[in-house]
Amino acid sequence: MSLSIIGKRYGRALFEAAKEQKTLDQTAKDWQLVTDVWTQHPELREWAVHPQVSSGEKKEVYDKLFQDLSDLARNLLHLIAERNRENAIEAIGSEYQALVHEEKGVAEAEVITSHPLTKTGEKELIAVFQKIIGKKLVITNRVEPDILGGAVVRIGDRLYDGSLVNKLKRFRKELTAIHIG
């Protein structure tokens, strides 16, 4: 089974349980902690997916690493250990966060810029796009110097390309279309 399918299945189950217990925000924080530790420590990932490591050993280590997790997050981590699904931890987190945002009427946007956004620039961009999409906006900024300037904003399946490199390409295309004669 693919990580995407596993992530969706477990992420939805975590969401439904957290919603029922009215702990959406706390569960998001808990699972973000798990995801952060998982992504920042490759030695943990290598150890956890090794076939000779038992689920009991994994649970013991997870309990020591994540002492402050809620019962809900801890139980899911134990289930993941039993079923050897650790490689899906990030996918579970992504699915869970997407469902929480959907529940709260929040849209996620990826903003690609040539330089990191300033706080002022971030606030202005959020204000503009919140009006367009009619939802609260949470953004992540990715820096790609190749776009030269401007910004590319991806919200769901919509793409708003205001990059300088794209404007230059359109300008070049317009110039080559002009027949002087």
Image (cartoon, rainbow, N blue to C red):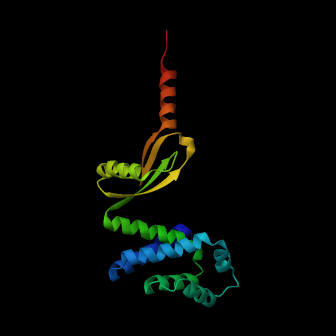
Q: Nearer the viewer, residue 7 or 56?
A: 56
Q: Position of residue 34 (x, y in %)?
A: 52, 76
Q: Tell me which residue sits at (49%, 12%) in the image.
A: 180
| Quadrant assignment for the N terminus | bottom right
Q: Position of residue 109 (x, y in %)?
A: 42, 55
Is residue 164 depicted above or below 74 in this figure?
A: above
Res. 2 image quadrant: bottom right
Q: Tell me which residue sits at (33%, 81%) in the image.
A: 20
The number of numbered badges drawn on the structure is 0
Q: Tell me which residue sits at (52%, 67%) in the image.
A: 4
Q: Nearer the viewer, residue 151 or 53?
A: 151
Q: Nearer the viewer, residue 16 or 100?
A: 100
Res. 63 image quadrant: bottom right
Q: Position of residue 105 (x, y in %)?
A: 31, 63
Q: Tell me which residue sits at (53%, 41%) in the image.
A: 147
Q: Position of residue 138 (x, y in %)?
A: 39, 59
Which residue is situated farthest in the top direction here? 181
Is residue 70 depicted above or below 178 in this figure?
A: below
Q: Is residue 84 shown left or right of residue 115?
A: right
Is residue 105 depicted above or below 155 in this figure?
A: below
